[in-house]
Each structure stands twice: as C-alpha cells, then as structure tokens.
Image: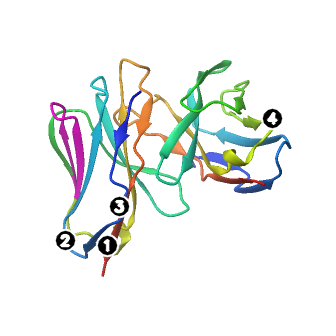
Amino acid sequence: QKEVEQNSGPLSVPEGAIASLNCTYSDRGSQSFFWYRQYSGKSPELIMFIYSNGDKEDGRFTAQLNKASQYVSLLIRDSQPSDSATYLCAGADNNAGNMLTFGGGTRLMVKP
Amino acid sequence: EAQVTQNPRYLITVTGKKLTVTCSQNMNHEYMSWYRQDPGLGLRQIYYSMNVEVTDKGDVPEGYKVSRKEKRNFPLILESPSPNQTSLYFCASSSLPSGTGNEKLFFGSGTQLSVL
C-alpha cells in the first residue's frame, strides 16, 4: 500500500513569514512529486513538481526532495493571505504507470 | 479554452437511485481519471482510463462504474448509490497519468454528491 502522509493542520503563519509544509512517503519506487494547491470548494491546481534530490525554486515557492529520507517539503516565502488554502502532496511511481498517490493535505492559514 | 467540464456541480439523491456524473475534456488527452475527496483523506482514485475502451480500477472502485467510448468523455456511474458514497468527486485528464514534468493534471470543477 503506497502512502503519502501529511499533517492535516491547520498550519497558521503570519503574513510575510515562511510557511513550511511537509510530506513523507512510504513507496521507495516513487520518483516524482507534486504539490497542488486547493482553495476551499475549488479543484486542485499544480504549483510545483520535483523529481531530483535537492531544492527547486519557482518565485516564492521552493520544493525540497530528500529521497533517502523519503521526505518532500514546500516552502512558501513572504506568505500572503491569498496563500491560505489546502496543499496536497502527491507522489508518482514512474515504473507503475505514473499513477499519483495523494496525501490528505495540509490546511494553511496566513493571518494578516 | 482548455478545460475539463464536469456536471452536475451539486447532486442530492436517494439510496439506490442510479446516477451518472459526466466528464468531458477538450484537450485530446489520452489519460482520464476519477477521484473522490473526503475530509482528511485527500484525493483517492476511483477509476482511470489510459485510452478509449481501456479502463482500470484505482484504489476505491467498489460501487462505481466507468466507460470510455470516446476519447473526450469519461462518465462515472453509480448504479445503486449508498450514503457512504457521499463525497466530493473530481474528474481529471492529462497527456500522461501523473502529469509528469510540465504535463499537469487538469481537474474538473468537482461534483458534490449527497446520498440520503
């Protein structure tokens, strides 16, 4: 059973702070990882993907992957109230049809 | 505009009354999938399809049926709905199953189903 685990939160941070969202996975075959943002009542939208160990930066967002520790994280710098949403972590096993396994999501609240 | 169209947006029904949730994409994607989302459980895959006439079970297929007679359409059928199928449902499509690299998953707007 492949599992992707996330703390459900809510994670509350003040505006302008760094929000750190974490995700662990059990399947060592997972090779690609994705972060989706989901506003309340809306569909998920892709923020970032990462498949190499290390950091990947895109604007205020940085994804981090550590395959040895089976750990993925998303950092949001200069957090804004508009970042308040649920963040879903997902892993894909390229050798198993690339099917995505989603975590339960972490709810982020950025307070003005 | 590239999109996945899902209908209806909201549906209230009673136990045992057959229903269909439609899903259509206009991007010529080969891969389509259905997910259900319940609080704290994230998105769980119900069924997926790699191409026309090719469907397979996901993690939670019990109580659901799908068909892929045309590339653009992938309806979800509940033959005899039960209250435990009350959930938020999403259809998604992509060129590749995981949205590998820049090929992201496109999601429909969701269907909130309540089975009384």
- Tag 1 and tag 4, C-beta contact below 8 Å: no
Mark 4 and mark 3: Cα distance apart in space: 36 Å
- Considering depth in this image, is A20 or A61 the residue closer to the camera? A20
Residue mark closest to the camera, 1 vs 3: 3
Q: Position of residue A71 (x, y in %)?
A: 22, 40
Residue beneath disc 3: A9
Labels 2, 4: one chain: no
- Tag 4 and tag 3, C-beta contact below 8 Å: no
Point out the image quarter for the C terminus of chain A: bottom left
Pointer 4 chain: B
Question: Secondary structure under badge 4?
Answer: loop
Q: Position of residue A106 (x, y in %)?
A: 36, 56
In the visual, does A33 lie left or right of A20? right
In the visual, does B13 lie left or right of A36? right
Residue mark closest to the camera, 2 vs 4: 4
Using the image, determine if residue A95 lies above or below residue A92. above
Mark 1 and mark 4: Cα distance apart in space: 43 Å
Going from N to C along the chain, the mark reached first, 2 or 1, is: 2
| Colouring mode (rainbow / by chain / secondary structure / one colour) | rainbow
Residue beneath disc 1: A110
Labels 1, 4: one chain: no
The residue type indicated by label 2 comes to Ala
Query: Residue A95 lies in what quarter of the image?
Result: top left
Q: Residue at x 41, y 25 (%)?
A: A98
Mark 3 and mark 2: Cα distance apart in space: 17 Å
The residue type indicated by label 3 comes to Gly
Residue beneath disc 2: A17
The residue type indicated by label 4 comes to Glu
Find the magenta span and give its range: A58-75
